[in-house]
Image (tube, grey):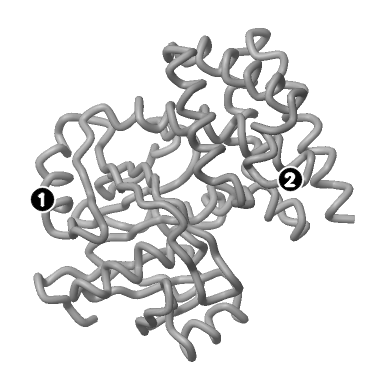
């Protein structure tokens, strides 16, 4: 197994928009990066063409999930949470000298990570990235990657990793209250993703359609009250994201149109399960998205 300029070897699991963006930047700054994908079709194209970000191509070795190796120092998980059921048996095999870095939607809690020996970091990814096909991505909005841990005992390790991968084109920050950042991002996802998926529209339609906007405000209000987040501040942030990404297609809409399972169970469904009776609009939205999944799958 090769080592990068600072001795690190990093696996990026999941080559969607986020995974390709992260892998491209880590390889660009001289780290040894290996990609892992679910689909053989994508593996072949990435091996042949490399990852193209805004016209710049970088080649990295790419393998199937079935070839995952425990010899990597860090494993960055950039898949949808629906893939965790498949990947967890592999994660359980990693020993205490390994690091797992989860960059996924939804909220991560200690219960999800039971039986894992590897050290765990949590990431919140704020860049606006659009994927085109199996090997091309475009950055639509600059953001940041925030990293933290679920316990104080890993803070020094997180800080060390942050300093090793931080770069002006790929800013990375240590976030002490990473679960709060996750919750805030989840509120935005719980508003934008299901509405755009149900009505098959771009994010900006939420601003233009008064009925969609009313639904969005109700979803924001229920989620913020459940998660103890300031409602109006979060609403303004959500509106700003809708405006900034007005011509973007949400990942949930892309999943619906591709006949794939969405992350609804880990977003709105999470709120329904953890705050029963307190989020009725989210309960209805969850049922509607799950019904639409079946219709489009058939």
* Nearer to me, 37 or 162: 162
Other residues around mark 2 within 10 Å, as few (<14) / some (14–19) / many (≥20) = some
> Percent from the top left, x then y, of residue 32?
23, 76
Label 1 packing within 10 angstroms: few (<14), some (14-19), many (20+): few
Foreground disc of the pair 1, 2: 2
Q: Is residue 110 above or below residue 65?
A: above
In the rendered view of the protein, which quadrant contains the C terminus? bottom right
Is 184 above or below relative to 49? above
130 or 236: which is nearer to us?
A: 236
- The dot on residue 201 is 2
Q: Which residue is mark 1?
A: 160
Q: Identify the mark nearer the N-term, 1 or 2.
A: 1
Q: Nearer the viewer, residue 267 or 69?
A: 267
Q: Is residue 95 left or right of residue 16?
A: left
Residue at coordinates 64% horizontally, 51% vertically from top-left? Answer: 249
Q: Position of residue 35 (x, y in %)?
A: 40, 73
Q: Position of residue 147 (x, y in %)?
A: 26, 43
The quarter of the displayed image where residue 149 is located: top left
CA separation in Å, label 1 and label 2: 41 Å
Q: State the residue at coordinates (66%, 47%).
A: 252
Image: 28 above or below 206: below
- Residue drawn 68% across and 25% down? 213
Element type at marker 2? loop
Give how far across and how far down residue 92 sits, in percent: 39, 52
Are the two marked residues, 1 and 2, in contact with CB atoms closer than 8 angstroms? no
Residue 269: image quadrant is top right
On screen, residue 13 versus residue 144, left or right, reads: right
Q: Which mark is residue 3?
A: none
In-image side of 38 versus 9 (left or right): right
Q: Which quarter of the rendered picture does the N terminus lie within? A: bottom left
In the structure shown, which secondary structural element does the residue marked by tag 1 occupy?
Answer: helix
């Amino acid at each position: 197994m090769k080592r990068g300029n600072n001795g690190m070897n990093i696996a990026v699991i999941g080559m969607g928009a986020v995974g390709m963006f992260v892998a491209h930047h880590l390889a660009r700054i001289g780290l040894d990066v290996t990609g892992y994908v679910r689909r053989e079709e994508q593996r072949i194209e990435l091996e042949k063409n490399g990852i193209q970000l805004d016209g710049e191509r970088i080649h990295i070795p790419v393998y199937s999930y079935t070839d995952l190796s425990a010899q990597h120092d860090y494993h960055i998980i950039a898949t949808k949470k629906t893939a965790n059921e498949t990947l967890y048996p592999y994660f359980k095999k990693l020993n205490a000298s390994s690091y797992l870095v989860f960059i996924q939607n939804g909220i991560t809690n200690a219960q999800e990570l039971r039986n894992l020996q590897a050290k765990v970091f949590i990431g919140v990814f704020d860049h606006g990235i659009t994927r085109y096909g199996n090997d091309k991505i475009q950055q639509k909005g600059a953001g940041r990657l925030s990293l933290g841990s679920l316990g104080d005992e890993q803070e020094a390790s997180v800080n060390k990793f942050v300093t090793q991968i931080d770069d002006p084109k790929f800013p990375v920050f240590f976030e002490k209250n990473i679960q709060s950042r996750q919750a805030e991002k989840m509120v935005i996802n719980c508003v934008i993703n299901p509405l755009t998926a149900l009505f098959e529209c771009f994010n900006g339609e939420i601003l233009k359609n008064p009925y969609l906007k009313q639904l969005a405000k109700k979803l924001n209000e229920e989620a913020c009250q459940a998660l103890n987040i300031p409602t109006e501040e979060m609403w303004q942030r959500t509106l700003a994201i809708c405006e900034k990404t007005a011509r973007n297609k949400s990942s949930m809409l892309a999943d619906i149109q591709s006949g794939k399972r969405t992350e609804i169970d880990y977003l709105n469904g999470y709120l329904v399960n953890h705050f029963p009776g307190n989020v009725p609009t989210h309960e209805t939205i969850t049922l509607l998205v799950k019904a639409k999944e079946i219709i489009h799958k058939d």
